[in-house]
Each structure stands twice: as C-alpha cells, then as structure tokens.
Image (cartoon, rainbow, N blue to C red):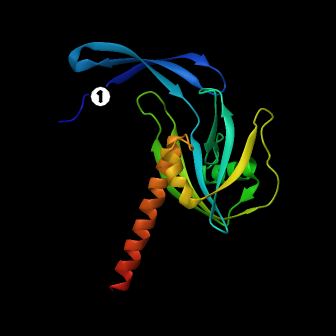
Amino acid sequence: MNPKKWNIVGKEEVLNTGFLKVHALKCELPEENKTHIFNSVELKDWVIVFALTTDGQLIVVKQHRLATDKITLELPAGAVDAGEDPQEAAKRELLEETGYTTSLLVPLHSMDVNPAIETNQAHFFLASGCTKVGEQDLDPDEYVTVDLMSYDDFYPAIFTNSLSVLCAYMANQFINNALADAENEQIKNQNK
C-alpha cells in the first residue's frame, strides 16, 4: 500500500536570511478532507570531499562551528553556488578550504539531507592524488585550519567523536561500497 500524498496548495516565505529560506506550506489531503501547515527549509546543496594526497593521507579541516559551539574536525565541504555543477563545487571547495587540488575527482553518491524539512542534497566525492598548489582562499568570516590524517586513523576517529560530522561516516561507507564494487567488477572480468 502506498502512503498518502499531501497536495501543496499554497507556499508562503516566512523567513529569508540569504543563507536559508523557511516556507510555510499549506497542504491538503483531499480524500480525508484535511489541511495542515508544514514548514520546509530551503538550503543550498552541498558537497563533501573525501580527499587523499598522493601519499595516501586524508585531508581534513578544523573549524569552530557556532551551532554546536565546538571546534570540529571535518572533511572539506561547502555549498554549491547557484548554477554550479556539484563536481565543480567540490573542486572549488577543496582548493579554497585547503589549497589542494586533485588529479581525479569521482562522484560517490548524492542524497537528500533531511527530506522531512529540508530541500537540499549532499553530494559526496572522492578526490585522489591531491597536491598542495597554494594557500587557502577563505571567505572573510571563515577560519579553517588544514590537517592530514592517515586513512587507518580515519574510521576510528568517527567513533571516538574526533570526527564529529555524520558526513564523514557516510563518506567512508560510500568509499567502501565503491571499492567493493570495483573489486567485484575486477573479479568478474578475470572470470570471463
């Protein structure tokens, strides 16, 4: 049985900060003669880059996150600008936040962030062969430091709260899935 689908019959912007918009959605469920107001938050899509240097080190960034009032250790990430392709945004964010560029950028997965209330998607990328080509090019209100971490330390860091963002865990899952798919494809090709 399929779930019932609400019809959106009205949309009113109740907040616009420039970074996000909140809409009140007037919805109705005709077969039950119901109406309800739901809220949605319109945010930009964002990219998360699992970036490995030429010697296999993982590039991570540290910054103060005001929502949690904590210094966090994260993967390079950022918003997709209007009209920008997510892959181009991933390259741009990697360069701006870290000063590194990549010779290979592979899309891993795209997903809704929080479809209950948010309209945006997160796009995950693997960047390999990264090399330092310059200094960071941060926004005036951005204060980010760059670190390198061994891949072996990455997974445990997720579960000791050293890496505090769910995206790090998700990126690791997508990497593992991609590696398993590649290995299965290689085995399949060898058996032909």
Kindly identify the residue that appears in the image at 48 percent across and 45 percent down: 159
Local packing at callout 1 (Cα closer than 10 Å; few below 14, some 14-19, many 20+) is few
Relative height, residue 77 to residue 38 (above, below): below
Q: Position of residue 36 (x, y in %)?
A: 35, 14
Relative height, residue 115 to residue 135 (above, below): above
Q: Position of residue 47 (x, y in %)?
A: 59, 46
Kindly identify the residue that appears in the image at 59 percent across and 17 percent down: 15
The quadrant in which residue 163 appears is: top right
* Residue 139 shown left or right of residue 65 in the figure: right
- Which quadrant does the N terminus fall into? top left
| Helix, strand or loop for disc 1 | loop
Q: Nearer the viewer, residue 172 or 96?
A: 172
Q: Position of residue 59 (x, y in %)?
A: 66, 55
* Residue 5 shown left or right of residue 162 in the figure: left
The quadrant in which residue 191 appears is: bottom left
Kindly identify the residue that appears in the image at 27 percent across and 13 percent down: 34
- Which quadrant does the C terminus fall into? bottom left
Furthest toward the front, the residue is 160
Q: Nearer the viewer, residue 188 or 70?
A: 70
Q: Nearer the viewer, residue 49 or 65?
A: 65
Three-letter residue code for mark 1: Lys
Label 1 belongs to which residue? Answer: 5
Q: Position of residue 84 (x, y in %)?
A: 64, 46
Q: Total number of numbered labels?
A: 1
* Residue 61 shown left or right of residue 48 in the figure: right
Relative height, residue 183 to residue 1 (above, below): below
